[in-house]
Amino acid sequence: MYIAKNNEYYMAPIEYLIEKLELQPHPEGGYFKETYRSVGEINKDSLGNEYSGKRNYSTCIYFLMTSNNFSSFHKVNQDEIWHFYEGAPIQLHVISENGEYSAYTIGRNFSKGEMPQLVVAGGCWFAAEVSEKDSYSLVGCTVAPGFDFADFTLPSRKDLVSKYPKHEKLITRLTHQ
């Protein structure tokens, strides 16, 4: 988001984005605001056993991270689509249920292999961080079926390291406890 000042445009300060977009702290780190929740719902009997009840078709949020914080390793049952809006690229770290690690860069510099959109498969553990010092990243996250905190798991560092000991260094760096 850019702010016009004397007919010139400047990157918006982080505080401005938090206020303008009405963002709140997120339990995994960073700031968020839900911007969409479909009216339509999927009945429990049409969902897998990992769901405790009906879910909206889809939900969407703004998500803001700074280089001073990160999105801690967590997982959701649903597929989550990340959409890059502005700021520094994001490094997204994914550990599959069987322990395979993958890293992706979400951004707009295609010549450096960045992608403006990325899908994280439901059930994978993932964390994200801003790739540049003294910067921020503003993204959107779309979840289908719609997000519900009942589908959200924020593990302790100890539990995730015990499950994936070969990724201990990464997990330790990208968990809050």
Image: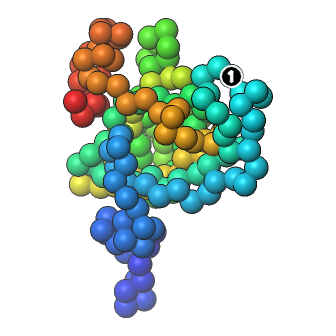
Q: Position of residue 142 (x, y in %)?
A: 60, 46
Amino acid carrying mark 1 in the image: Gly
* Camera-side residue of 108 and 19: 19
- Residue 53 vs 40, above or below: the answer is above
**Residue most extreme to the bottom:** 6
Residue 27: image location, x then y, percent: 35, 43
Residue in the foreground of this view, choosing between 52 and 97: 52
Q: Is residue 124 left or right of residue 159?
A: right
What residue does disc 1 label?
A: 48
Q: Which quarter of the picture shows residue 7?
A: bottom left
- Residue at point 63% right, 42% down? 146
Front residue (pair 81, 12): 81
Can residue 80 be seen in the rendering of this structure?
A: yes
Quarter of the picture containing the N terminus is: bottom left
At x 57% / y 60%, what residue is drawn? 35
Q: Is residue 45 left or right of residue 118?
A: right
Quarter of the figure with the C terminus:
top left
Give left or right: position of 155 versus 61: left
Q: Nearer the viewer, residue 75 or 174?
A: 75
